[in-house]
Image: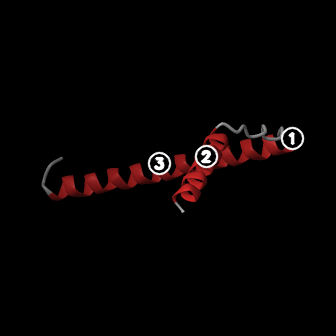
């Protein structure tokens, strides 16, 4: 029984070492359409994030002005 477990453990170790040294094939090249779609998506995301930031900044400024005026400061 002990010999079987030793052989099994050795086999698992050899398999683990072989798996860590395996190379994956390179990903397929993207077509021009895929590149354009990815660039459009990135541009849309960036524009949305910029709009969200501007909205949050406007909200913060309005809140500051409201609280500043409530404290009697100019």
- Residue under label 2, please give it: 16
Q: Position of residue 48 (x, y in %)?
A: 58, 51
Category of crowding for the residue at label 1, using alpha-carbon neighbours closer than 10 angstroms: few (below 14), some (14–19), many (at least 20): few
What is the secondary structure assignment of the residue under circle 2?
Answer: helix
Q: Which residue is mark 1?
A: 31
Question: Disc 3 or 2, which lies upstream in sequence?
Answer: 2
Q: Which residue is under mark 3?
A: 54
> 21 or 65, which lies in front?
21
Which mark sits nearer the N-terminus, 1 or 2?
2
Residue 3: give x, y in percent of width and height. Answer: 56, 55
Q: Is residue 60 left or right of residue 35?
A: left
The single residue placed furthest to the bottom in the displayed view is: 1
Characterize the local packing of mark 3: few (<14), some (14-19) or many (20 or more) Cα atoms within 10 angstroms.
Answer: few
Observer-nearest of 63 and 56: 56
Q: Are marks 3 and 1 in contact (CB under 8 Å)?
A: no
Horizontal side of 68 relative to 10 (left or right) equals left
Q: CA distance from mark 3 to mark 1?
A: 35 Å
Give yes or no for contact between labels 3 and 2 (Cβ–Cβ under 8 Å). no
């Amino acid at each position: 029984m002990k010999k079987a477990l030793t052989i099994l453990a050795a086999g698992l170790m050899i398999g683990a070492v072989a798996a860590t040294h395996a190379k994956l094939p390179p990903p397929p090249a993207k077509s021009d359409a895929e590149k354009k779609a990815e660039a459009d998506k990135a541009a849309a995301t960036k524009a949305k994030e910029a709009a969200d930031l501007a909205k949050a900044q406007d909200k913060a400024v309005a809140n500051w002005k409201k609280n500043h005026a409530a404290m009697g400061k100019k």
